[in-house]
Image (cartoon, rainbow, N blue to C red):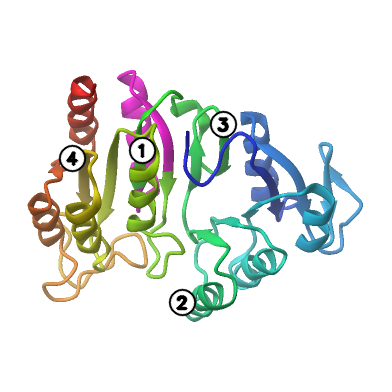
Amino acid sequence: MSIFVDSDTKVIVQGLTGGQGRFHGLRNRDYGTKVVGGVTPGKGGTDVEGIPIFESVEEAVAATGATASFVVVPPRFAAEAVLEAARAGVSFVVCITEFIPAQDEARMYNSLRRDYPGTRLLGPNCPGVISPGQCNIGITSGDIALAGGPVGIVSRSGTLTYQALYDLSQKGVGQTTCVGIGGDPVPGTNFIDCLAAFEADPDTKAVIMIGEIGGSEEERAAEFIREHMTKPVVAYIAGVTAPAGKKMGHAGAIISGSQGTAQAKMKALEEAGVTVAKNPTQAAELMVEIVSKLK
């Protein structure tokens, strides 16, 4: 099994006619994802390599039965694009757009939670989700993923998401689903959402969790793991050498005083029974050891 998406998921791409939308949308389709339509106002009735373009998400959903949307639009329009998908009844939205204004993100997040609880947002500013051999929505290369499980991956860092996939695949350890939740301060889907889904998924036997400095999401995840997870978790926290007060990469990766440090996060995870790696390569090595001992 997989979480959030599977081989039957029908996807529309908001922004399919743009450069990034076309590149990644067609790449997802070529992986085997059921990309059934695109949405670009003013270009309805055209197509991109046989994929029909619609004027609105509502029109696209009515015509295709899509349940997922891939948002690839500029920052100033991204929040409204996500809400348009929610209004049309799309249950899963992946938004890779970076540099969405923080106020727009906060309003979008609160609107989704208040008015559209049936819609899950992944992102923004994330690589997306891939269930190897089934569905790929986002910018992750399918070439580095390996179907067959039994490991689930959840990560704040896009680059380290790819490394975790590649390292495991090179060692012959497959993945059920890999979720990049993104590093913005207001993510639509967080660590706990993914950990709970992996815990409930019978095919996921172990989880790699990749965090980074800033915020308290990893500490909250550690508490959830302690209280609810029965499956082994390996974690890596990026930013051990980051100086306090400096933003490192993601908008959410900033240390404030003693809060949000890598050391604090690592300590919380270790106390919750998580195996904490010193570097990304070691995380994969530790997971290989764990998988070798699974029944």
**How far apart in space, not on screen, are marks 1 and 2 (Cα)?**
30 Å
**How far apart in space, not on screen, are marks 3 and 2 (Cα)?**
33 Å
The amino acid marked with disc number 1 is: Gly
Which label is found at residue 279?
4
- Which of label 1 and label 4 is nearer to you? 1
Which label is found at residue 277?
none
Sequence-wise, the earlier of marks 4 and 2 is 2
- The foreground one among 206 and 37 is 206
Residue under the image location 42 percent in, 33 percent down: 176
| Residue designated by label 1 | 152
Q: How many numbered callouts? A: 4
Q: Are marks 1 and 2 in contact (CB under 8 Å)?
A: no
Residue under the image location 45 percent in, 29 percent down: 145
Disc 3 crowd rating (10 Å Cα; few below 14, some 14-19, many 20+) is: many
- The foreground one among 137 and 243 is 137
Position of residue 181 measured from the top left corner of the image (x, y, whole percent): 41, 54
- Image: magenta residue range: 155-178
The amino acid marked with disc number 3 is: Gln
Relative vertical location of residue 123 with respect to residue 291 in this rendering, above or below: below
Q: Quadrant of residue 40?
A: bottom right
Sequence-wise, the earlier of marks 1 and 3 is 3
**How far apart in space, not on screen, are marks 1 and 4 (Cα)?**
18 Å
| Position of residue 77 in the picture relative to residue 160 (left or right) | right
Which label is found at residue 134?
3
- Which of label 3 and label 2 is nearer to you? 3
